[in-house]
Structures are given as structure tokens and as C-alpha cells.
Amino acid sequence: MVPGTAGHGSRWTGMYVQVRADWTIAANLVGSVEAVHFQLGDSIRNAGGSNADYLGVQLK
């Protein structure tokens, strides 16, 4: 729920794009890199929201 948006604007909140790469480094080690971009819709942007980006790196 985003304050100030009830009954206003459209139902479209936005969209995201995700890219992920996994690779086996050794028999017991896996690495991952992930990037996400979230593009806001006008209703949330007009309520003060902004686009977001995420980058994650993981070793397991």
C-alpha cells in the first residue's frame, strides 16, 4: 500500500527486469551475480516514489 494513491491513478505499479548468472567455480562452490531494475508507473512516481536498482553477488 502506498499512502495517497487509493482511488487515484492506474493499477499499473511498474515493471522490473532481472538478469542473473550462476556458475560452478569448484565442486563445492557456486557463484552468482544478479542485477534488477524496477521502473515505476506514474501513480507511484506521482506519490513520491522513484526507480530502483539492485546488484547482488553471492558465493555458496
Image: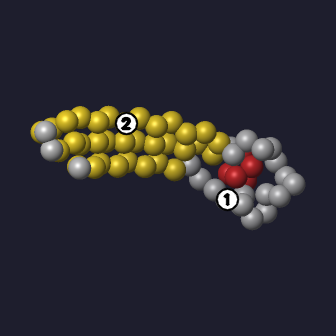
| 35 relative to 6, above or below | above
> What residue type is disc 1 on?
Gly
Where is residue 45 shown, x and y percent of the image? Answer: 68, 51
Name the element at disc 2. strand
Residue that lies at the very extreme toward the right in this rendered image: 7
> What residue type is disc 2 on?
Arg
> In front here: 56 or 51?
56
Image quarter where the N terminus lies is: bottom right
> In front here: 10 or 31?
31
| 47 relative to 17, above or below | below
Residue that lies at the very extreme toward the bottom in this rendered image: 3
- Give the residue number, with chain letter if any, for mark 2: 20
Residue 22's mark?
A: none
Q: Residue at x 55, y 39 (%)?
A: 16
- Give the residue number, with chain letter if any, for mark 1: 48
Name the element at disc 1. loop
Q: Residue at x 63, y 45 (%)?
A: 40
Say which quarter of the image contains residue 5: bottom right
| 5 relative to 30, above or below | below
Name the side, left or right, on which 24 lies relative to 32. left
User: What distance separates the C-alpha of mark 1 from that of mark 2?
Assistant: 29 Å
